[in-house]
Image (tube, rainbow, N blue to C red):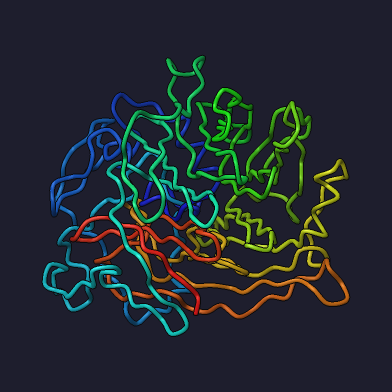
Amino acid sequence: MMGSRRFGRFAVVLGALSLGLLVTGCEDECVDSYDCTNKKGSAPEGKRYVCESNRCEVRDNTPPAGDAGTDAGTGTDAGTGSDAGTDAGTNPGTDAGTDAGVSCADLPHDAKLGTLQLKTGFAAAESVALPAGISQVTALKSGTDFKLYGLRGSDKSLYELGTWPDIALGGAALKSVIADADRSERTYLSSFLANDGTRLLAGYTKDGPFTNIPGTVLVYDTASPDKSTYVSANGNYAAAGIAGYFFINGQGVEGVSAGGNAIYGLKTDTSPFQGAQVATFPEAGVFSSSVAVTSSDIAVFGYGKYDNAVKATTNFLRAVAPATYSPVLTGGSPLALSDANAPQIYSGTDFFSAAGFGDGVALHRGVTDMTTYESFTRDVSRISLTTGGIDPKAVTVGDLKPVLTTDNNCTQVGILTPLGADLLVGVSDKNGSRLVRIQKQ
């Protein structure tokens, strides 16, 4: 599943177009500042990397102050999910992250949540350090426990992290996300790590036109690693899994003649795997965005539309019941997403990413500095999604409820990923980077 914001690599303001710009740029050392972070690690405290003339340079860190007077839902267009090529623990350090001009170093920081405020109805359970360099995590249920796996950007490889909450980056990489044939080429990790209960899914893209970006996903079999394989999946932008199946928000998948921005599927409980186009978006001129799945397997499919007149993108999220999408998974025709079969649950220019959170979905929202492409958290909120009653295809959509909020830039949210019915949130601040388990009470 897509983690959370990409820590500024490129905003969803350009969606798939930004991904195209990312992979078609020409550079020696970097395309943007987060290539620098990927290659050099975190900048010194109080500093940040910038990419100037395709070279990494160190500059003073002066992000915009948080606006305590602006609703989190009305900020400028936000970034995408967390960048798989960047350490999700990028440290805000001691920036002047408050409206009052108070340094972050002078503000009290909770040991788990830093300066984030936990809202009524939710609890913060275990908190553990995020292993260095890990930018995405996913949790596989193992009996009553959860085994965590991570994606490291520096070597573009998968790692086993251990059983929650006793995790660490130990041992050799499980496998490179990059196929052998592409390791001599310029490749770009996609911003997700998902699982279908047994297998992991991670992806990458290569240089190409933004309307059809060459890409590949690695399907890593945790039970039988020798069965792991690479599958062509152009423009793979986000992914989420259910048992034996992956949803991929992108531009195509192996074995499917149809292409373009849409929701694709990969059936993994058959040999060979079977690809399908699962759903098309309800209007033209839109691009792939997020994808998430609740604990009851309700799928959330996202897409964005850029308005050149106002220089902003609105992201749209629609919920699809299992009874609605299941026929497609067994060979039926793709869904044409509409209000009738997939109610819209959210739209906004402040969207970063989504992840399943029990019988609902968590949204990470914020603002982005369009000069540096750094994104800043304003809140994590949750929408309840349920099915049942007379019509199993109907989805009941709850209100948007805040889970974590902030009025400064001193603590940033990175990773969002399900942990059973709970939510793992990656946070970073002056005290480092960690994963925090958030539970609904």
Residue 174 in the figure: left or right of residue 433: right
Depicted 76 relative to depicted 12: above or below = below
Q: How many marks?
A: 0
Instruction: Identify the residue shown where x is 63% and y is 57%.
Output: 293
Instruction: Identify the residue shown where x is 62% and y is 35%.
Output: 211
Depicted 342 relative to depicted 25: above or below = below
Q: For the view shown, which residue lies furthest in the front direction?
A: 143
**Measured from the top left, where is residue 261 in percent x and y?**
67, 43
Instruction: Identify the residue shown where x is 36% and y is 63%.
Output: 436
Instruction: Identify the residue shown where x is 56% and y is 46%.
Output: 238
Residue 260 in the figure: left or right of residue 96: right
Q: For the view shown, which residue lies furthest in the bottom direction?
A: 120
Q: Quadrant of residue 149?
A: top left
**Measured from the top left, where is residue 159 in percent x and y?**
40, 36
**Measured from the top left, where is residue 185 in percent x and y?**
44, 18
Please tell me which residue lies in front, 269 or 430: 269
Please tell me which residue lies in front, 361 or 308: 361
**Measured from the top left, where is residue 407 in percent x and y?**
31, 76
Depicted 141 relative to depicted 382: above or below = above
Q: Quadrant of residue 171?
A: top left
